[in-house]
């Protein structure tokens, strides 16, 4: 089968054998999404080697011990836990110390014709949700996952920094909880994508005109300057939610965090079930985030395209 | 009067006029303590110019409208709020945006014969507490202040990084709440100071042999490597409490904070009343932290001494 792989510091489309994994489900991938994390992996993040990609929708082909799943259209939680530690026993493998992560840690990913995952990771996609929407479940879950860690009330004054894909989804999901959500970004046309979703938009150059009285700021730009801007916007004892993962170390003003007693909350993966609900109920716009769609055969080109300025979500299709 | 001042990038003992502040209390300083923040100010931290020092015990000489305070031995909360904003109205000036801070922001400090503070900042010192103990109320309050921000339970596995004055007080105060407190530091003789206070001690070179399953790590070393070590020790979704303020920016692995969903809690000033209680009840050892005592007239020498390796608390006495 075809798979988009990063090996020996080289990105390539390869022909590899189809998975045949007796203890896991085999999923025929219909569509996958290119995430910034994929771009970071190609720069060396997470020292990953293998098939990249972790956002997908597909159809179950094999599922030993869970035959009811066969033929179902599914999305899949990307953390595959050991199944036996305390965390896994509680049904949350996201921090299992022995976990593998689809296309990120020790497990081939989704930019391929087939992938495998434990059956417990799979969730059926309601028929109301198109493939081109379902492929957003993973990043949408990550955005909505903020609410697992920080309480957001209708009056919470909240800013999201970064008008890319992740920032957009964070702003939209936060606006379901708070009436006071601002999205700060560099691009008027990207900011406009959330116009109808109860989000105020602010160009970066005007951000410092906002009062520095935000209760919560979500950093989703992945840049060091985003971190400093977040500190500028927060009120004392405010909360800074970090969403972006990137390669390398960042510089930051530790003493500002101490003096203003800021709480910095690292936030990664969310639950898939609530994200599916949001899409089913049409509470989130995702299709306007799609910039382009490529066939898997043009995967290398697609990844390069996804890294270009101004490009939002690039999808890979396996069905042509 | 004599005062230890930092002006035009120069530390000196100066003769200045005595304060005569009609709306604030005038306190004759008995003893003051040199804090690492004083050393950072002399390196440029907080861009402060004036009399430094914020840890003190003294006797009230004048107190317009609060004559009952006159002659009383007091300590004083260092943040002087505007008195009229929402925060001040709630009795907590620590984050008032218009606050001055004794010897740190816009207000002459404690390494002088006299200082002034609003009367509401002053707390009488119970007679059971010696001057050489009372002078530790400010850093002790800062250490115990962690409990205002992070819940510590008897089973909370907690490590403090840094065996200096602040780390010592953090370890002692945390050990009043948890049965599982470890102090990590470079110096066996400093670590031994907490031996009788229900704290396990670990030399830095052995710290990574500890399991990385700490619920809370308090960074009190003020070094970048302390931050990285804290991440090494924390379990996923653990809490990193930052206590140290220092000049300049630090590098840190933002993606580790995100991937492990760590919460970083900046923590600065605590309440004085509980700290006075701890000292009165002899629940904390402070006098074994004193390295040396100087007369105020030798203030410059004292500050230099405080900056030398291996030196713990240096006190200034105004009563000789």
Image (cartoon, coloured by chain):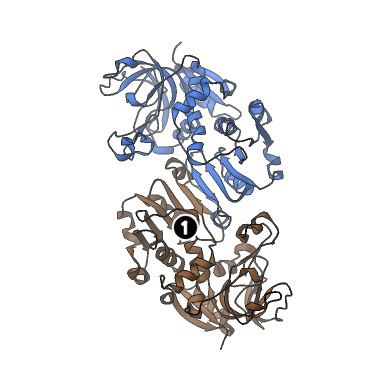
Chain colours: A brown, B blue
* Of residues B307 and B10, the one drawn nearer to the viewer in this rendering: B307
* Left or right: A71, with A203 as reference point: right
Instruction: Say which quarter of the image contains residue B9.
Output: top left
* Of residues A168 and B175, the one drawn nearer to the viewer in this rendering: B175
* Of residues B170 and B18, the one drawn nearer to the viewer in this rendering: B170
Tell me what residue is drawn at x 64 percent, y 75 percent. A5
User: SS of the residue at dot 1?
Assistant: helix
Furthest-top residue in view? B320
Q: From this viewpoint, is residue A305 visible?
A: no
| Above or below, A32 relative to B193 | below
Graded by Cα atoms within 10 Å as few (under 14), some (14 to 19) or many (20 or more), the crowding at tag 1 reads some
* Left or right: A18, with B299 as reference point: right
Which residue corresponds to mark 1? A147
Q: Position of residue B164 (x, y in %)?
A: 58, 31
Q: How many marks?
A: 1
Instruction: Say which quarter of the image contains residue B165.
Output: top right
Tell me what residue is drawn at x 54 percent, y 39 percent. B222
Q: Position of residue A4 (x, y in %)?
A: 62, 78
Instruction: Say which quarter of the image contains residue A225.
Output: bottom left
């Amino acid at each position: 089968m075809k798979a988009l792989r990063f090996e020996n510091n080289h990105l390539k489309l390869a022909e590899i054998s189809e998975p045949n994994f007796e203890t896991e489900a085999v999923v025929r991938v219909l569509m996958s999404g290119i995430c910034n994390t994929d771009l970071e992996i190609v720069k060396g993040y997470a020292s990953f080697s293998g098939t990249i990609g972790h956002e997908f929708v597909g159809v179950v082909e094999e599922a030993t011990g869970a035959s009811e799943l066969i033929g179902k259209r599914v999305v899949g939680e990307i953390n595959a836990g050991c199944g036996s530690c305390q965390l896994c026993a509680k049904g949350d493998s996201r921090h299992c110390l022995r976990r593998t992560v689809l296309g990120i840690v020790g497990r081939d990913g989704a930019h391929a014709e087939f992938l495998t995952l434990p059956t417990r990771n799979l969730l059926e996609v309601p028929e109301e949700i198109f493939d081109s929407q379902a492929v957003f479940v993973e990043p949408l879950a990550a955005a909505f996952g903020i609410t697992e860690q920080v309480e957001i009330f209708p009056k919470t004054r909240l800013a999201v920094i970064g008008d890319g894909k992740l920032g957009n989804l964070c702003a939209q999901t936060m606006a379901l909880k708070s009436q006071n959500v601002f999205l700060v970004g560099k691009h008027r046309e990207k900011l406009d994508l959330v116009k109808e979703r109860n989000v105020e938009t602010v160009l970066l150059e005007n951000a410092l005109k906002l009062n520095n009285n935000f209760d919560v700021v979500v950093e989703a730009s992945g840049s060091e300057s985003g971190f400093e801007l977040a500190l500028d916007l927060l009120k004392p004892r405010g909360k800074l939610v970090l969403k972006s993962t990137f390669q390398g170390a960042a510089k930051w003003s530790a003493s500002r965090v101490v003096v203003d007693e800021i709480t910095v909350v690292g936030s990664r993966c969310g639950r898939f079930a609530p994200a599916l609900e949001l899409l089913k109920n049409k509470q989130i716009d995702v299709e306007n985030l799609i910039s382009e769609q490529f066939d898997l055969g043009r995967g290398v080109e697609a990844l390069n395209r996804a890294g270009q300025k101004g490009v939002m979500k690039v999808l890979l299709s396996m069905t042509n």
